[in-house]
Amino acid sequence: MAKAKIGIVTVSDRASAGVYEDISGKAIIDTLNDYLTSEWEPVYEVIPDEQDVIEATLIKMADEQECCLIVTTGGTGPAKRDVTPEATEAVCDRMMPGFGELMRAESLKFVPTAILSRQTAGLRDDTLIVNLPGKPKSIRECLDAVFPAIPYCIDLMEGPFLECNEEVIKPFRPKAK
């Protein structure tokens, strides 16, 4: 079985400032390592909040590097520089609004400002792209909410079979009749 490639993209203007420790991208990698028992390979980038750069990165990871899943962090708020959802929508063939709805609903259990978040998700050919918030605690809360649907979504797109540590996260896959 081929190793799944999963893109992790941190969107932050601080990244181009020189000294920057990406705790958000590392939080995604740590969470995926907790969830997944199947082999996977991270394809990792830290990029600035520029829509054309975000779009080019998502296209490269989906089309050239053949990631079955791309998870972004950052750039989902209301600030003028927050353009990750726009970049995601621009490169996707179809949007998956349920992901953003569920992530906001989950985040509202913890902070009233979750309504300011614009996370979204979409499909580019055989790749699922999911936008997460920038804070590590919020990343885990949102992934805990939506990840149970991700392996089945990738199955439906004929991607690699993602096996999970069911003591940590239980993926939903319909039972065959």
Image (cartoon, rainbow, N blue to C red):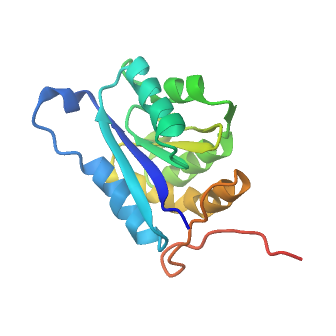
Which residue occupies 68% across, 61% down?
152
Q: Is residue 59 left or right of residue 33?
A: right
Quarter in which the N terminus is drawn: bottom right
Extreme residue toward the right, this view: 177
Extreme residue toward the left, this view: 19
Height in image: 72 above or below 86?
Answer: below
Give the camera-side residue of 155 and 121.
Answer: 155
Extreme residue toward the front, this view: 1
Which residue occupies 57% across, 22% down?
90
Give the camera-side residue of 111 and 97.
Answer: 97
Q: Is residue 49 left or right of residue 6?
A: left
Residue 72, position in %: x, y?
A: 43, 41
Quarter in which the C terminus is drawn: bottom right
Which residue occupies 67% across, 40% down?
96
Residue 118, position in %: x, y?
A: 51, 34
Whether residue 82 can be seen here: yes
Residue 61, position in %: x, y?
A: 46, 38
Residue 65, position in %: x, y?
A: 46, 41
Whether residue 119 can be seen here: no
Q: How many marks?
A: 0
Which residue occupies 40% across, 57% down?
41
* Quadrant in which residue 27 is drawn: bottom left
Give the camera-side residue of 30 and 63.
Answer: 63
Height in image: 58 above or below 42?
Answer: above
